[in-house]
Amino acid sequence: MATRPACNLIQRIDLVTLNSWNELLVTQYQGEEACMQALRDYLNGGREHQRLPELAVRCFCRNRASAIAERVEQLFGSAAQPAGHPAGALHPAAAKCFQGAGVAG
């Protein structure tokens, strides 16, 4: 009996950021690498400002919305080591995901 390959349920990510001038910036990511690209930019933004931005994940779909949002929030939350992130250290699992997805940092 063959196992089904993992399915990416994320079709698009809109990363919404409010900067220090109260400007609302929206960056859209689509495709198979959307999650990894959004995660990369989220972590890089934290590195630039010496702290990670506040994270709130929302999912808009008929099925599994809360489960998907929770999983994405867990991924983003665990990708940076709490003490090591300002210096630029990534959790080893996140670094492996970047390499596997072919996403350049």
Image: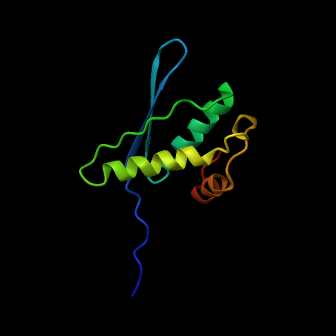
Q: Residue furthest top?
A: 21
- The residue shown at (41%, 58%) is 8
Image: 27 above or below 70: above
Q: Quadrant of residue 20?
A: top right
66 displayed left or right of 62:
right
- The residue shown at (39%, 88%) is 1
Q: Residue furthest right?
A: 87
Colour pattern: rainbow
Q: Residue furthest front?
A: 83
Counting from the top left corner in percent of width and height, residue 19 is at: 53, 19
Q: Residue furthest bottom?
A: 1
Image: 33 above or below 28: below
- The residue shown at (34%, 48%) is 66
Counting from the top left corner in percent of width and height, residue 100 is at: 60, 60
Can residue 34 be seen in the rendering of this structure? no
Q: Quadrant of residue 80?
A: top right
Counting from the top left corner in percent of width and height, residue 31 is at: 43, 50
Image: 84 above or below 101: above
4 displayed left or right of 35:
left
Can residue 78 be seen in the rendering of this structure? yes
Counting from the top left corner in percent of width and height, residue 88 is at: 73, 39
Tally the marks: 0
Q: Quadrant of residue 44?
A: top right
Q: In what quadrant of the picture does the C terminus appear?
A: top right
